[in-house]
Image: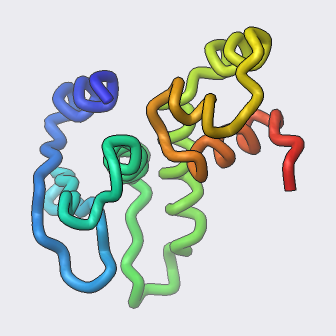
Amino acid sequence: MNRLLRIAGENDIPIVDMRLKGKEEALSESCGGRCIIAIDRRKVKSRRDYKVKAAHELGHCITGSFYDASCPVVPRGRCERRAEKWAVRNTVSPSELKASLKSGMTEVWELAEHFGVTEEFMIKALKYYGLWNGD
């Protein structure tokens, strides 16, 4: 999480706690060339979940992958994939992941604990790096 906070700070991207409507747990907005990330801590399940959400939203900000749900010109899926790839690359180092696997960490929960992310995110990272042999 420290690395993510450092990247946010270096890029002048505040991460604020904000009550969000509906099911929304986190979001990032760009206004006037400045990005802000809001995370509703009341909806976040754990520290790992917070880290994953922060990484994903920071991915939107750093890559400029924003979309307007009412505008079909910029596909939402493409923006989400770019943000998620950035999040994976900046939370799970491929060399550290391979070293962890070689050292005997083979369970998703072990790897997720080691990297401080959710199991769902760890599976995404394993798939991204071509190391997922599961379903």
Residue at the (82%, 41%) spot, across then down: 132
In this rendering, position of residue 135 left or right of residue 44: right
Residue at the (71%, 21%) spot, across then down: 105
132 up-or-down from 76: above or below: above
Q: How many marks?
A: 0
Tell me where residue 73 appears, x and y as whole percent. Answer: 51, 80
Residue at the (51%, 31%) spot, across then down: 113
Tell me where residue 36 appears, x and y as whole percent. Answer: 17, 53
Q: Quadrant of residue 65?
A: bottom left
Color style of the picture: rainbow
- Seen from the viewer's position, the closer of residues 96 and 72 is 96
In this rendering, position of residue 92 left or right of residue 34: right
| Residue furthest bottom in the image | 70
In this rendering, position of residue 48 left or right of residue 27: right
29 up-or-down from 101: above or below: below
**Does residue 79 appear in the picture of this structure?**
yes
In this rendering, position of residue 45 left or right of residue 88: left
**Does residue 59 appear in the picture of this structure?**
no
Tell me where residue 48 appears, x and y as whole percent. Answer: 39, 42
Residue at the (48%, 51%) spot, across then down: 83
- Seen from the viewer's position, the closer of residues 111 and 9 is 111
62 up-or-down from 34: above or below: above
The quadrant in which the N terminus is found is top left
The quadrant in which the C terminus is found is bottom right
Tell me where residue 118 appears, x and y as whole percent. Answer: 51, 46
